[in-house]
Image: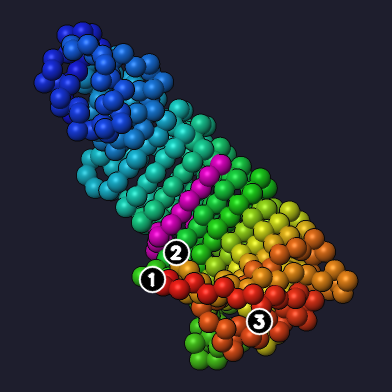
Amino acid sequence: MSSTDSSSETSDSDSSDLRPATSVGARRLFDRMPPGIDCIGALSDGILHHILSFLPAQEAVRTCVLAQRWRHLWKCTTGLRIVGNKGPFWRWLNGLLFVSRCLRTLVLSGVGLQGTTLDFSSCPALEDLTIGFSVINVGKISSLSLKCLSIFRCRSYLDDRVRVSAPCVVSLKLLGFSGITPLLESMPLLETAFLTLGAHGHHTSQDICQKYSQSGVYCGAKHDACTNCHANNDGSRNCVVLGAISNAKHLELISSFGTVIFTRDLKWCPTFDKLKNLILNDYWCMGPSFDALSCILKHSPVLEKLSLHLFKGLRANVKMKGSYSSMERSSVISEHLKVVDVKCSVVDENVVEVLKFLCTLNIRILFRVRVRKGT
């Protein structure tokens, strides 16, 4: 990035150096301005802070040499985008994360996080944190200000669970975590959560029942249970994730077969007092007793919509709708339940068993099957 000044002495060559970093839409803002006018310098500090948030962190910092006015602008950028974890830049970053009082958005991609605690208490304005494709070898992630937290395609090599303490989070995404599943602490303000646990693509969880592959059944918390099914001395003696997200209004809970977290958490299943919309995959619909599905429905007293995704991939070929018969109420089902969606690739034997189980709960499926062709 070339040097430019806030005065009218900025050269045409300096301006042209900046152009590749701007979009066509951004350049149109200044199409009618007379030649020689410092277009960037004419913007307010607030707008410049927002513009800088779209630059990689290294580039944002380099703007400090452009002119006197730019010396400290980068410190107030509203977002920070960080890619990579090598060299002196990362050593500089280790201190930066704990001193920014203006930072609202932080995106970490392809980095390695190490240490005892990733503490954002000195970033009181931080509301949106995304960590992706990264190694998280820290004992705890802590923030009192976060409202949106996304952790996807990350890995931990620790022998203990990474604890996540973010009591003000409203939106949570935990997708494809490799290693030991993080332990979520209480999130009383949570509204929406999307959790995908277990083996997905190249990402594998260590929270796998060691006997499931042979028997197809979780060994549970019996005296002869496998190591992973036993409650551990890592703070997860009760719920690992379900207890923390029990205040959510919208939940999507996806897991691969063999993963023990949801099944084990259900032994101490909390009551989802505010849950209105629930999306589950086939992990929750294992016969013949359908214990997992029955348990979470029983603990969702105000549930209005239930969606069962019994398919692999991004889209379903078959969609069926059902409703709860209030004339024949079941003690397991919320009296507020209005809509039940069942989506699958084909109506095979497993799907038929799920439909039969729903009928025992007085959920009537309307066999208005919609087939998506070419998907």
Check the image and report above or below for 184 versus 72.
below
Q: Marks 1 and 2, Cα distance to the nearest angstrom?
A: 8 Å
Disc nearer the start of the sequence (1/3): 1
Q: Are marks 2 and 3 in contact (CB under 8 Å)?
A: no
Secondary element at image label 2: loop
In the rendered structure, which amino acid carries the disc numbered 3? Val
Q: Split into 4 quadrants, where in the image is the C terminus?
A: bottom left
Where does the magenta region start and end?
147-162
How busy is the neighbourhood of tag 3: few (under 14 within 10 Å), some, or many (20 plus)? Answer: many
In the rendered structure, which amino acid carries the disc numbered 1? Gly
Q: Is residue 133 visible?
A: yes
Please, which residue is most extreme toward the top here?
8
Instruction: Say left or right for 76 vs 212.
Output: left
When asked about the image quadrant of residue 25, the answer is top left
In the rendered structure, which amino acid carries the disc numbered 2? Gly
Task: Tell me the number on the disc at residue 201.
Answer: 1
Which residue matches tag 2?
176
Q: Is residue 244 visible?
A: no
Secondary element at image label 3: helix
Image coords of residue 354 (percent x, y): 66, 81
Task: Tell me the number on the disc at residue 354.
Answer: 3
When asked about the image quadrant of residue 336, the answer is bottom right
Disc nearer the start of the sequence (1/2): 2
Image coords of residue 153 (percent x, y): 40, 60
Q: Marks 2 and 3, Cα distance to the nearest angstrom?
A: 26 Å
Q: Are marks 1 and 2 in contact (CB under 8 Å)?
A: yes
**Which residue lies at the image location 76% right of the left edge and 63% below the top edge?**
337
In the image shown, does 71 or 50 lie closer to the viewer?
A: 50
